[in-house]
Image (cartoon, helix red, strand yellow):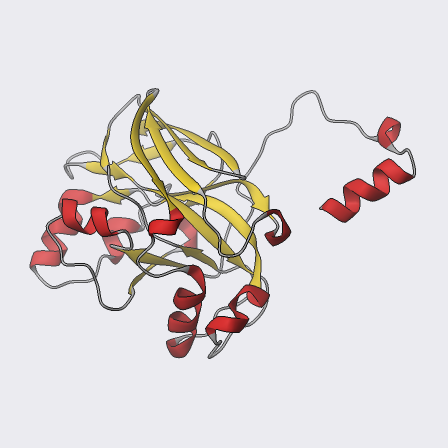
Amino acid sequence: MKAICAHVRKNRLQRYLSLPQEAVLKAPISRPPKIVALGLNYVLHAKEGNFEVPKEPILFVKVGSSVIGPNETIRIPRGLGRMDHEAELAVVICRTATEVKKKDAYKYIAGYTICNDVSARDLQTKDILEKHPWFRSKSFDTFSPIGPWIVTPEEFRSPVHVGVECRVNGKVRQKANTRDLVFDIPTTIEFITKYITLEPGDIISTGTPEGIGPIKHRDTVVCRVDKIGELKNPVRYR
C-alpha cells in the first residue's frame, strides 16, 4: 500500500483518482474457506467466564456462510436466549501453511481485519455443559461480521499490539489491547498448522477481550481495532 501511494505521488496521479458518490463495502472475504477462532485468549475474559486460563490455544471453527460485511444486519434468532458481541482482531492468510514455525509465521499473513464473533451464549453454555463443541452457537447466518477492509502487514509493527474496542449504542463494552493475548499470533499460527493446513483466504480470529455482553433487536454494534478502523452492524430479529 505504501508503494502504491508513493507511485501515485511521484507521478502526480492524484487528479486521475476518484471515489464513487455511493460505495457499498462488502466483507473483504465473503466466503473464507474456513474461520479458525480462539476461545479464552485474554486472561480477563477467561476469568469473567469463571474459566481457567488455557495452557494451549482453544480452537473452534465458524462456517464461511456466517460472514457478512460492514453495515449489514446481524439477524438474531428468536427463542434462543442471550446473544453476545465479541470484538476481535482477525488475521487473513495469504498462502498454504502447514507445520509453520513461529519465526516464520508472519510470512503467511496477507493482512489484518476485524471480526465480530457473535455468539448464542445460552446455547454455547448448554453445549459446554454437555461437552459438545461450540460450533452451532457460533455459526448462525450473519454471526461473523468481517471488515471493513484488510490492512496489509507493513502498516503494523511486529509484534502486533493494537487496541480492540466494542461499543453498543455508543457505550463502550470492551476495551483492551492485543498485547494481552494469552497466545500471540505467531504462537497461534504454529499451533494451528501443527494439526490442520491453512489456505489462502482463511481467517484466524484471535479471541475477544473481557467485557462481552448481550445484543438485542435494534442495537447497533461497532467493533474497532487500531490501524484498521471500525466495523459497524445493526442488529435485528430474523
Q: Is residue 122 above or below residue 233?
A: below
Residue at 20% across, 33% down: 78
Q: Given the current orientation, which residue lies at the most extreme right position? A: 11
**Image spot of residue 117 (x, y percent):** 34, 45
Q: Is residue 238 visible?
A: no
Percent position of residue 133, x then y: 20, 62
Count up the numbered dots.
0
Left or right for 104, reference 181: right
Compared across the picture, whether 1 is left or right of 225 comes to right
Q: Position of residue 180 (x, y in %)?
A: 33, 50
The residue lying furthest to the left in this view is: 129
Q: Residue at x 40, y 31 (%)?
A: 73
224 on left or right of 13: left
Q: Quadrant of the C terminus?
A: top left
Taking depth in this image into account, of 13 and 137 the one nearest to the observer is: 13
Residue at point 65%, 22% (across, down): 22
Left or right placement of residue 225 versus residue 171 in this view: right
Tell me where residue 229 appears, x and y as whole percent. Answer: 52, 34
Q: Nearer the viewer, residue 60 or 99?
A: 99
Q: Is residue 92 visible?
A: yes
Based on the displayed image, in which of its 4 quarters is residue 236 positioned?
top left
Which residue shows up at 39% across the image and 60% down it? 184
